Image (cartoon, grey):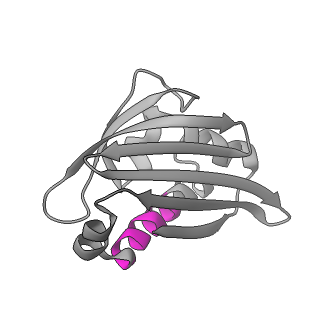
Amino acid sequence: MVIEESILINAKMDKVWETFIDLTCWKDWNTVMRNVSSVEKYLSHGGKISCSFRPFLLPIKATIRVEDVIPLKHIVWCAKKKGLSARNKFTFQSNERGVVVTSKETFSGTLVRFLVFLLSKRKMRTLIKTFLRDLKNASENQLTT
């Protein structure tokens, strides 16, 4: 299962990038991922993030590992949990109106069919759209420094 969503953020690339990679500010804007903790202050290659998602009543705890970071271009992270793998690539592209951020999340493993049944592709798409809207609001409204 692959879910791809994009959003235009009316802010400069530096601001969007800083908002995205500064984990200390995620609690101020990120409504999708809760209880975010990391040894690192910023997303970086090889870094890990612990968090929880709440796609339905019970939270799902996850550990996300950052696979690749090319500053101002893209970040790739992955999470694995009991027969399910999720890999998300976020790309950042400047244009005359701001920055287009694209999330391409790929789910694989033996539990993908169960995930689709339990959460539905529409629910997963909603979570990704919400995360991107949260990033847009934080970047445009200068919620982080």
What's the magenta region? Answer: 122-134
Where residue 86 appears, as percent x and y from the top left, is 42, 53
Q: In which quarter of the image is the N terminus?
A: bottom left
Q: Examine the rendered structure and indicate whether residue 36 appears above or below residue 10.
A: above
Instruction: Answer whether residue 96 is visible to the viewer in this image.
Output: yes
Q: Which residue is drawn at 76% across and 61% down?
A: 98
In terms of depth relative to the viewer, which is nearer, 113 or 78?
Answer: 113
Relative image position of residue 15 (x, y in whole percent): 67, 45
Instruction: Name which residue lies at 46% across and 44% down.
Output: 78
Which quadrant of the figure contains the C terminus?
top right
Q: Name the residue nearer the viewer: 81 or 75.
A: 81
Q: Which residue is pictured at 68% across the width and 46% down the height?
A: 74
Q: Quadrant of residue 117?
A: bottom left
* Residue 145 visible in image: no
Q: Is residue 127 magenta?
A: yes
Residue 10, image x and y in percent?
70, 62
Residue 66 relative to residue 80: left or right: right
Who is closer to the viewer here, 117 or 27? 117
Residue farthest along the top direction in this orientation: 39
Drawn side of residue 142 relative to residue 84, left or right? right
Q: Which residue lies furthest to the front in this view?
A: 110
| Magenta stretch holds residue 135 | no
User: Which image quarter: residue 108?
Assistant: bottom left
Q: Residue at x 49, y 51 (%)?
A: 87
Q: Residue furthest toward the right?
A: 96
